[in-house]
């Protein structure tokens, strides 16, 4: 059995961090192998062998991300008078600047307003900056199994199965903010080998393999 762990308990907060980022990694596993024996039923010593390996990873983390392009408090209510003239919005119906470079409340689409309130955060780092620490959660499980069988004195059959399950959950650090993403992948690899010894100088090996990932 084996275990490796990392924890942020003694870490310090970075210069740009609002709070101490999360850093937690746990890697663990075990191996088991030897001759394949079923008491009173089958004795595979010197003929049948097996090996199984498992490894798991659990990783929780967060990292500071800095956005510099969120809307200011005045711009969120339609007032763009602080922008350079070339960047101030124009009325799409007339092609002229809005009065006092402010979009009237009645001209702001309610869908756009809902999107702004939900996915574009308020600045927390100066007038336009935003600092966040989006979380990430990674889970990974891997299993390897191997079985070898000697057939007579000249043939050996080996079967190997590799399985991996990986799940990633994280939150976007860019706009639109706070979108939760979930990615899962399962993969199977199976390899079958048959080795035949014709002589001390001639050996033949037949390999069949298949892979599946979803």
Image: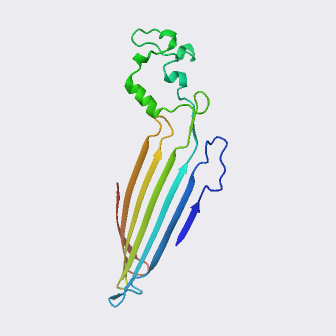
Residue 40 in view (yes/no):
yes
Q: Nearer the viewer, residue 203 or 119?
A: 119
Q: Nearer the viewer, residue 199 or 115?
A: 115
Q: Residue furthest left?
A: 41
Task: Describe the colour scheme in one phrase.
Answer: rainbow
Above or below for 193 versus 56? below
Q: Which residue shows up at 55% across the image and 43% down it?
A: 133
Residue located at (46% from left, 8% from top): 96
Count the numbered circles shown: 0
Q: Nearer the viewer, residue 145 or 55?
A: 55
Quadrant housing residue 195:
bottom left
Estimate the x, y position of residue 185 in percent, counting from the top left.
39, 54
Task: Find the residue positioned furthest to the bottom.
Answer: 40
Check the picture and name the quadrant holding the C terminus: bottom left
In this rendering, is residue 49 above or below 181?
below
Is 5 displayed left or right of 165 in the figure?
A: right
Q: Is residue 37 above or below residue 213?
A: below
Res. 197 visible in picture: no
* Residue 179 placement (x, y as % from top left): 44, 40
Residue 35, image x, y percentages:
42, 83
Image check: 16 left or right of 119? right
* Percent coordinates x, y for residue 172 in the rendering: 48, 41
At x 38%, y 27%, the residue is 111
**194 or 149, which is in the foreground?**
149
């Amino acid at each position: 059995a084996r275990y490796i762990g990392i924890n942020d308990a003694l870490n310090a907060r970075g210069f740009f961090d609002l709070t101490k980022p999360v850093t937690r990694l746990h890697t663990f596993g075990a191996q088991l192998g030897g001759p394949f024996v079923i008491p009173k039923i089958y004795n595979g010593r010197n003929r049948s062998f097996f090996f199984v390996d498992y490894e798991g990873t659990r990783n929780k983390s967060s990292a500071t991300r800095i956005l510099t392009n969120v809307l200011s408090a005045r711009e969120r209510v339609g007032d763009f008078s602080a922008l350079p003239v070339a960047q101030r919005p124009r009325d799409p119906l007339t092609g002229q600047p809005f009065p006092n470079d402010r979009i009237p409340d009645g001209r702001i689409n309610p869908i756009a307003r809902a999107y702004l309130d939900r996915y574009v955060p308020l600045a927390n780092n100066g007038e336009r900056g935003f600092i966040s620490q989006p979380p990430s959660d990674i889970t990974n499980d891997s299993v390897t199994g191997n079985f070898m069988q000697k057939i007579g004195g000249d043939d050996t059959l080996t079967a190997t199965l590799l399985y991996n399950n990986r799940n990633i959950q994280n939150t976007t650090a860019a706009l639109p903010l706070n979108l939760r993403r979930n990615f899962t992948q399962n993969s199977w690899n199976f390899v079958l080998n048959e080795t035949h010894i014709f002589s001390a100088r001639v050996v033949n090996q037949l390999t069949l393999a298949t892979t599946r990932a979803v």
